Image (cartoon, helix red, strand yellow):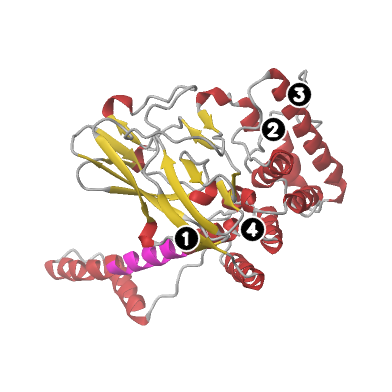
Amino acid sequence: MRQFAWKLIVVAPFLACVWCVAQDAVPGTASAASGAAVKLEAHNGQTQFKLGDPIVVDLVFTSAASGYSVDTDVNPYQPSGDIVYVSPDDGWERSQQSQSGKGLNGDALRTLGSEPVRVPVLINRTILFEQPGHYEVSVASERVRSTSTLVRLSPIEDCAPCAATNAVGIEIVARDATEEIELVASLSRELEETKGQAPPPELTESQKKTMQEVEAQLISGDQSEEGQKRMKELLPKLNEMLAERMAADEKRHADRLLAAQRLACLEGEEAIRAKVHLIAEEKESGEDTPIGLILVNGLPSSHNRQLQLNLLEAAWRDPNNLPTYELHEALRAARELARDGMARVFEFDGSEEGRKAAVRQYQADLDVIIGTLPQRAEPNRTEAIQNLKRLGVPNPFNQRTVNP
């Protein structure tokens, strides 16, 4: 089991630049990097959405010169590194911070040339649209890097590569309340039915025959010319079968992530209840496609933030739930949203006073868990105690003493 949000308290937030852009901020106009160009386009041509739909646009990068790379990482579990600007100034709010200056995922780097590199950006990660209407959105990021700046983090006070793109117009229309309730039920059912490790798909009769022939050939150990020829004939069939199984598994993974993202973006009270239920229910092991953090990232999309906080406080106190990292992150975000209307990347502002307040709050949360231990059944109780022992925050189970 992973540790709670304590790791966000002890990691110095000055290692990255946290962007909390005011709603009336004016985007930059320069190109993303000298020698490289970026423009914003509608994703798959879609410009009309309903309230609560995932709103995706594409950053499209090109360069006539060599020496540039693009970070194409769109990891849904990490804070967004893209800064979204919206006009007009009303009808929406900035509900979650963006984080610039993050480390690079080398596997996601793509060499930039004349062929466009497209990176989808989920606007809902940091923006909550509250009213139907026409909006103009633009995006700034530091995704394009020259070879000389690949490992250089942006300074705190500035992000030189972060300049806004052109604007793309989108139309947002109202969603019928009954339709949203039905959609929540459908998405929740899909996520419940696909949780846990996916069972291997049943083999077709043809695939079973291929497997039997491969096994028989291997067992026989026939190294004759005829035996090697037979194995050579079987290998393409075996590779095709494995490719089909991998494709089916990847589709299941992608469908589950999409369902979680769609639920995360919905704004009504039934969606809130479904998000909290699934976050509290998710275990930190045995899940090949975890969705907890995706749903946590969707909490800023909720309208009734007091209800959301009440439900998460109840879930944290419930001895039937494990005190997971995702559940505590959800509780932390819900507090911030109910108090300030903004979910922050880091738990405190870097000040000593902020650090002490975060420690006190976290210790209070741990006291709640400790108080529920007598009501917890096994193996829940043992897992909760093991987690308490691993924490950096002092508690009766790790016997650490610090001056908060």
The quarter holding residue 358 reads top right
Looking at the picture, how far across and down is residue 351, in whole percent?
A: 66, 20
136 lies above or below 209: above
- Spatial distance from mark 1 to mark 3, Cα to Cα? 41 Å
- First in sequence: mark 3 vs mark 4: 4
**305 or 246: which is nearer to us?**
305
**Contact? badges 1 and 4 (CB < 8 Å):** no
Q: Nearer the viewer, mark 1 or mark 4?
A: 4
Q: Secondary structure at mark 4?
A: loop
- Spatial distance from mark 2 to mark 3, Cα to Cα? 10 Å
Q: Secondary structure at mark 2?
A: loop
Q: Which residue is mark 2?
A: 391
Q: Which residue is mark 1?
A: 253
**245 or 235: which is nearer to us?**
245
**308 or 324: which is nearer to us?**
308
Q: Is residue 124 shown to the viewer in this render? A: yes
**355 or 169: which is nearer to us?**
169
Q: Residues within 10 Å of mark 2 (few under 14, many from 20)?
A: some
- Spatial distance from mark 1 to mark 4, Cα to Cα? 24 Å
331 lies above or below 359: below
Q: Residues within 10 Å of mark 1 (few under 14, many from 20)?
A: some
